[in-house]
Amino acid sequence: MKARDIMIKDVPTISRKSSLKEAVLLLKKNYGDKSFLNSAPGLVVVNDWGELAGVLMPLTIMQALLEAAETTEPSQREDAGYFDLLCGAIKDKLVEDIMEREPISVTEDALLVDIAGLFVQHRFQRIPVVREKKVVGIIYRTPLLFAMTNCLFK
């Protein structure tokens, strides 16, 4: 089996020039979407030509918030408006300011066993599938596991 056999073609993407607010709204919209088989939310970032430019994960956004937290006083952490303060510090950032810029991707012809190796080696939640640099699908690790272990249920 190959990537094309199990990839999901409905890929949640976002422009690298989008705001973090737009990114979080899209993450909220896609979270728990049955078509993504309860996968961990994340977004594939594309450039103006629809080519893979990066990935944006919830942890990446949390990291930006934690970096903003480093500039605050410890006494502020218990304030009711603390997260308003942190959000204010990152609200003008664009997706391209914090995204992972060198994402690993596979082609439609990649073998499932090789893709599984990437998941295990890098602890990814998702891997974009590209054709001539354009995103054409995504593979999540749970559907990959199910495809690889389908023979257990015969």
Image (cartoon, grey):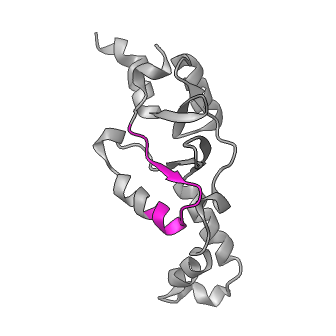
Q: Can residue 76 be seen in this view?
A: yes
Q: At which x and y percent is residue 66? A: 63, 70
Position of residue 138 in the picture relative to residue 67 (left or right): left
Q: Does the magenta stretch include residue 137?
A: no
Number of marks in picture = 0
* Residue appearing at x 50%, y 53% in the figure: 14
* Residue appearing at x 36%, y 52% in the figure: 30
- Image: magenta residue range: 10-24
> Which of 97/68 is in front?
97
Q: Can residue 37 be seen in this view?
A: no
State which quadrant residue 118 falls in: top right
Q: At which x and y percent is residue 129? A: 53, 31
State which quadrant residue 18 falls in: bottom right
Q: Residue lying furthest front in this view?
A: 49
Q: Is residue 23 magenta?
A: yes
Q: At which x and y percent is residue 80? A: 47, 88
Q: Is residue 64 above or below residue 100?
A: below
Query: Where does the C terminus fall, quadrant-wise?
Result: top left
Q: At which x and y percent is residue 134? A: 56, 35
* Residue appearing at x 58%, y 44% in the figure: 49
Q: In this view, does 140 lie above or below 109?
A: below
Q: In this view, does 101 lie above or below 87?
A: above
